[in-house]
Amino acid sequence: MSTFSPFQSGGPEQVMYCHDEPSGLRAIIAVHSTALGPALGGTRFYPYADEDEALADVLNLARGMAYKNALAGLDLGGGKAVILGDPSTDKTEALLRAYGRFVQSLGGRYFTACDVGTYVADMDMVARECSFVTGRSPENGGAGDSSILTAFGVYQAMRACAEDRWGEATLRGRRVGIAGVGKVGRHLIEHLNGDGAEIVVTDTAAAALDWVRRSHPDVRIADSTDDLLADELDVYAPCALGGALNDETVPRLAASIVCGAANNQLAHAGIDKTLAERGVLYAPDYLVNAGGVIQVGDEAAHLHEGGFSFDRARARAAGIFETTREILRRSKADGVPPAATADRLAEERMRAVGRLRGILLPG
Ligand code: NAI
């Protein structure tokens, strides 16, 4: 890949390579768009096979953040960062602080947050060198664990899908399968339990399943994600890793709604069409899982005036219900899958608001 090949039309505004030899830091920060405001997106700490894989991931994730933040109505652009390495062995104070200094050097064009492999305590450490950090601990004025409002938002979107499919905005009496009961999946169980849904889960980690057995003995555990897919589900909620909806899984899917937290659920372009052809309502992932960025976006927006407010962020995340409704309505009216409608709305907002701010986008 040539240095400028990612910067084609519709590509990122900026890509920064960061290297700190003493701490071993190797990171890439991608600012996809600042059309709506400073770019916000988490830091993924992951043992990538090579630099090309890391670059492809950060570019893809930064673009996704721009669309997610736009659709959530935030005054924030989209960006993301990846740290190359194994968080269980390579994460040190020096490395995180070196990383913080690079984020600081962007002068507020990019705000960071937690992602796979980084946690609230890591953001507290990054913040010792940097002002543009969210997802810090509440003790340090931060929004804390974003999975709380992510799960709340997923539940709101699921209610809107249920209304579309069955006429009532509730999961009462419906069978919901959750693949991945990590931070988000666990909170989602609580919401669905409260609503009277029947819940089936799966996870690859024994500890996660032990938690389910202890905390929710009434929740059924499927033997594998394959078994969960084939179960007579009403709703399938992918809450583990990306690529859950692919050429192998979609033909086996029994559920008539897919609505879950995982990022990048569609393995490739065109899978949303296959879902639509099979009569499956797919709620676009970045619409559904915006609760977390709404939570940390509140922290970014109020860094200097009053600080983070959970109630304000929760009220905003509740809006995911209405946005999902609107997207499903428009998607039907236009005869296109909901994912295409979501992309179009996000692009329209970036173009229109960007123009007001003097940033002209193609298209
Ligand atoms: P997590 O790492 O806490 O939980 C993921 C769970 O999935 C783990 O328990 C893991 O063992 C399990 N898992 C991994 N592979 C699996 C497989 N093949 N089948 C079944 N289970 C599997 O992550 P978290 O925070 O709960 O996030 C879940 C998804 O939601 C991720 O894709 C993340 O990117 C996305 N997301 C999370 C947000 C947040 O605020 N935490 C915000 C937006 C998106």
Image (tube, rainbow, N blue to C red):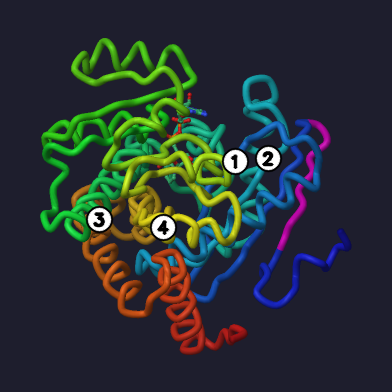
- Residue 44 badge: 1
Relative to 128, residue 290 above or below = below
Residue annotated with mark 2:
83
Q: Earlier in the sequence, mark 2 or mark 3?
A: 2
Q: Amino acid at mark 4?
A: Pro
Report the magenta residues as a range: 15-22
Residue annotated with mark 3:
161
Q: Amino acid at mark 2?
A: Ile
**Whole-Å distance between the Cαs marked 3 and 1?**
30 Å
Q: Are marks 3 and 1 in contact (CB under 8 Å)?
A: no
Judge depth for marks 3 and 1 and give the one in front: 3
Q: What predominant SS class does the magenta segment belong to? A: strand
Disc 4 is placed on an element classified as: loop
At which x and y percent is residue 214? 26, 10
Residue annotated with mark 4:
284
Tell me, yes or no, whether the highlighted magenta stretch contains residue 156: no
Q: Earlier in the sequence, mark 2 or mark 4?
A: 2
Q: Earlier in the sequence, mark 1 or mark 4?
A: 1
**Whole-Å distance between the Cαs marked 4 and 3?**
11 Å
Going 43% across and 79% down the picture, which residue do you hit?
A: 349
Q: Is mark 1 within 8 Å of ligand 1?
A: no
